[in-house]
Amino acid sequence: MALKHATPMLDELDKGPWPSFVSDVKRMAAKGNRMCEDWLGLMEMSYKDKEGHWKHGGIVGVLGYGGGVIGRYCDRPDLFPSVAHFHTIRVNQPASKYYDTAVLRKLCDLWEAHGSGLTNMHGSTGDIVLLGTTTDQLEPIFYELTHDFQMDLGGSGSNMRTPESCLGMSRCEWSCINTQDIIYDITQEFQDALHRPMFPYKFKFKASGCPMDCVSAIARSDCSIIGTWRDQVRIDQAAVNAY
Ligand code: HEM
Ligand code: HEM
Ligand code: SF4
């Protein structure tokens, strides 16, 4: 199927053996996804003009929350009506990012029905990032997430941000602390700060089970929690010999 907009510059990024976001978005556009079609046109124009055509058009969100949705609008809705709004939703990922495939399929279905179908698994902060939806879809999405998925929005703006942990004790032999438990606890304790902006800037917690620091808590968070040995390393020689 011929796509709505010609994209000679983006097409360059479609070439070669490596993964390409252009190939992905084109595949979705070819299936009749209007947002992806106009997204391609808008990107091509940005490449040509050497400037971004996304703009901030004000704050959007869901009732009672002051974060979790990042408002995006394009500055040429006349040319690209399907991406006139292209808001991003941050969804709090499960601790250490464990999913089963049923949930992942359901998330993709949700996003194809209510948004562009484009996702980013995961954003820098750790959230499931759902890219591109319109203001009228925000409450229905929020309702489904919280009622059918038992999932919540993440942080944005001057909220506390979605906390993140390494795999910790669930899979890693080096872990000195239960990072998932700590992050779950922090998430519950600071629900208010996570959903309502109360700081002059963002605030982040991250927990790594050992000094390897796989979530880069030191570089990426304001409060880094890192498991260490409190004492000399102790080895049960009898158990080692019996192995
Ligand atoms: C060539 C296209 C793009 C590139 C190379 C790009 C690059 C990036 C990078 C490197 C990050 C930080 C890493 C991350 O969060 O995973 C980021 C984050 C983000 N981008 Fe883009 N981006 C692109 C297109 C877009 C578009 C089209 C939108 C929305 C209209 C967008 C919205 C965002 C948002 C909301 C975040 C924050 C997500 C988070 O919490 O991590 N980006 N982008
Ligand atoms: C106009 C100013 C800035 C904009 C628009 C911006 C935007 C963003 C966005 C969209 C992200 C991804 C979402 C997130 O991790 O929360 C991000 C991440 C980040 N930004 Fe910025 N940023 C700005 C200034 C700064 C400054 C001044 C610093 C540090 C001196 C900084 C350090 C970081 C770091 C370390 C991350 C990654 C955090 C993580 O991985 O969790 N940013 N920024
Ligand atoms: S930070 Fe340490 S405990 Fe956590 S995954 Fe990395 S090596 Fe394992």
Image (tube, rainbow, N blue to C red):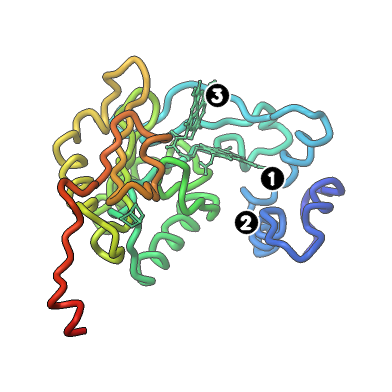
Which of label 3 and label 1 is nearer to you?
A: 3
- The percent position of residue 34, horizontal first and vertical second, equals 64, 51
Q: Is residue 52 above or below residue 18?
A: above
Q: Provide the secondary structure element on which disc 3 rests.
A: loop
Specify few, some or many for label 3: CA neighbours under 10 Å numbering under 14, 14-19, or 20 or more. few
Residue 206 pos. (x, y %): 31, 40
Real-space CA distance between mark 2 and mark 3, rounded to the nearest whole angstrom: 24 Å
Mark closer to the chain start, 1 or 2: 2
- Residue 33's disc is 2
Q: Which mark is on residue 56?
A: 3
Q: Give whichever of 151, 20 is nearer the camera.
A: 20
Whether residue 141 appears in this view of the structure is no
Looking at the rendered structure, the kind of residue marked 3 is: His
Mark 1 vs ligand 1: CB below 8 Å: no
Q: Quadrant of ligand 3?
A: bottom left
* Marks 3 and 1 in Cβ contact (< 8 Å): no
Instruction: Quarter of the image for the N terminus: give it.
Output: bottom right
